[in-house]
Image (cartoon, helix red, strand yellow):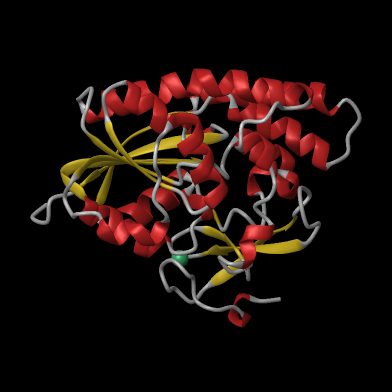
Amino acid sequence: MTYQEFKPCPLCGAPEQIPFAGCTDFMVSKESYTLMRCLSCGVVYTLDPPSEEEMKRYDKLNQKLKLGESPSGLIGKLYFRVRNHMLRRKAKLVETQAYRTNGSLLNYGAKTGFFSNRMERRGWKVTSVEKYHEERLFSLEMFHHRMIDIPEMENLHDGTFDVITLWHVFEHCHDPNGLLDRFYKLLRPGGILIMACPNIQSTDAMHYGPYWAAYDVPRHLWHFCPSSISGLALRHGFTLMHHERLPFDSFYISVLSEKSMRHRMAFIRGMAVGFRSWMVSLTRRGKSSSLVYVFRKRQETE
Ligand SMILES: [Zn+2]
């Protein structure tokens, strides 16, 4: 298999691609997918993923966790404890990076609305976008917070948001180029775009290779590293201002990876690998399992 057989890079249009890895959907379908790497922009992407419509059946994964039902097992319990800590941390990050403690925030891919609710309680005016009806209904019943569906974004006014957030959502989006252009218009001058994504250059990604759970094919269409995502954002008018670690992801992802490999004592082994990855990321941020990127909208004249 040579790169000439493949289509142009779906993000930058460059012709040269090489196979990067072969990954399996251990969580839902057991199907296998090829990951390709663009030799021009450096992005790694899932080749021939399901369409947006087809993806719904693959997204059933973690539905119980998403909808806030009682989790089972140690991973589920840890998930909820860590989530509360991370909600506080994310809120603080937004306010520190935006230099304000209130304003207008668009939360894209809001899922069940826990982060949106947290920011509203802190005084932010929050607009939430969520594609799944079940999640929108959950948010309405749980938080009395109405979310809009993706097509309703057409009704939003340009230049009105101080902050746009995507927490582990961008890697799921079928049209990153179109989305970044839309975000550029929706942000006010100087507004910020915050995106959290898994990092394929992390210590745990290197350790697990194709078994790394954060490849999460076919749900993750794009697999970024700091240089590929900042290059993409730059082409759409955004400058990288800051990036920081998401400390718990290395543990969660490593345990899931161990389970995919059907290793005995998966939890203990995963925690050990996760700890090593976390330790490395203390001094080498670019090796963190996941990263949060803060981009600022450049002025047209810059
Ligand atoms: Zn490319």
Image location (x, y in percent) of residue 133: 53, 51
Give 279 or 62, whichever is nearer the viewer: 62
Specify the farthest residue to the bottom.
5
Residue at 64% from the left image edge and 49% from the top image edge: 215
How many numbered discs sit on the rendered protein? 0
Give the residue furthest to the left: 301
Q: Can you tell which quarter of the image residue 144 is in?
A: top left
Q: Position of residue 63 (x, y in %)?
A: 66, 42
Residue 235 appears anywhere in the view: no
- Can you say whether 281 is above or below 50 in the image? above
Residue 21 drawn at (x, y percent): 69, 58
Q: Residue at x 75, y 46 (%)?
A: 211
Quadrant location, ligand no. 1: bottom left
Q: Position of residue 134 (x, y in %)?
A: 57, 47
Residue 6 in sight in this render: yes
Please say if 142 is above or below 163: above
Look at the picture and state if 156 lies above or below 207: below
